[in-house]
Amino acid sequence: MSTMGALSGISVVFDLDGTLVDSEPNYYEAGRRTLAEYGVLDFTWADHEAYVGISTRETVADWKRRYGLPATVEELLAVKNRHYLGIARTSARAYPEMRKFVALLADEAVPMAVASGSSPEAIGTILARTGLDALLRTVVSADEVAQGKPAPDVFLEAARRLEAEPAHCVVLEDAAPGAAAAHAAGMRCIAIPYVADQADAPEFATAGLLLRGGQEEFTAQAAYDWLVRTARAS
């Protein structure tokens, strides 16, 4: 039983991939297919894990340097997004407890936004596919700001659109660059590490709530209760 107004003054900003939706396997597959088109045939899941939390644009720019690809960053971005959208349209899946958490917050009219390193089209496709677009209407892509995570730009832009003070925002993040971005933005963070062995990363040490077990440890009720305590303390 929630108490009305228990969360007044709090705004919540969600990372998308690996936080709201289990999309990293889709991003890996899109990356593998993209690199294969340019003759790079040995891109592994371990290689992909190094890019978790980094914007798509910055990821493909690094591939261009690392693999000496002849294509422009724009072309690589377009190819990867094409592969990704094809996969996401059929297989994007929201984490059940995250879906519950979004619904709990919506019931109390808590302002919410999505701030992601993905392209606007990819974010829109995933939110529509999972039905989360009905509750999460404020969306910021790293393509719309100067720098992706770990810079705070996407989170600060989300706060601006929500007309919220950064200090009154709580970010949910699965990746170290995102936790660093939340800290740099002056926001509190609930961290749910996607890559288990990154739980000890120094970036996660700044989180207000660190769920070392990742999504398996996350429950909507526990996150909600933590938010209520945070709201009372502030």
Image (cartoon, rainbow, N blue to C red):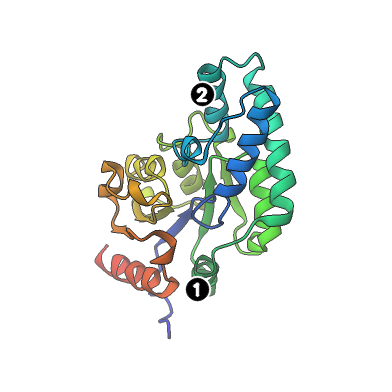
The picture quadrant where one finds residue 36 is top right
Q: Residue at x 62, y 21 (%)?
A: 73
Q: Could you tell me which secondary element the residue under label 1 belongs to?
A: helix
Disc 2 vs disc 1: Cβ atoms closer than 8 Å?
Answer: no
Frontmost residue, 116 versus 157: 116
Q: Is residue 208 visible?
A: yes
Left or right position of 19 against 32 = left
Frontmost residue, 228 versus 79: 79
| Label disc, if present, on residue 104 of the rendered structure | 1
Q: Position of residue 196 (x, y in %)?
A: 37, 52
The picture quadrant where one finds residue 67 is top right
Q: Which residue is mark 2?
A: 62
Frontmost residue, 223 versus 51: 51
Q: Cα distance, mark 2 to mark 1?
A: 39 Å
68 up-or-down from 34: above or below: above
Q: Is residue 187 visible?
A: no
Q: Position of residue 188 (x, y in %)?
A: 33, 53
Q: Residue at x 33, y 60 (%)?
A: 211
First in sequence: mark 2 vs mark 1: 2
In the rendered structure, which amino acid carries the disc numbered 1?
Leu
204 up-or-down from 144: above or below: below
**In which quadrant of the rendered image does the C terminus lie?**
bottom left
How many other residues sit within 10 Å of disc 2, few (<14), some (14-19) or many (≥20)?
some
How many other residues sit within 10 Å of disc 1, few (<14), some (14-19) or many (≥20)?
some
In the rendered structure, which amino acid carries the disc numbered 2?
Asp
Q: Could you tell me which secondary element the residue under label 2 belongs to?
A: helix
Q: Position of residue 142 (x, y in %)?
A: 54, 36
227 up-or-down from 202: above or below: below
Q: Position of residue 231 (x, y in %)?
A: 32, 66
Q: Residue at x 61, y 25 (%)?
A: 40
5 up-or-down from 132: above or below: below
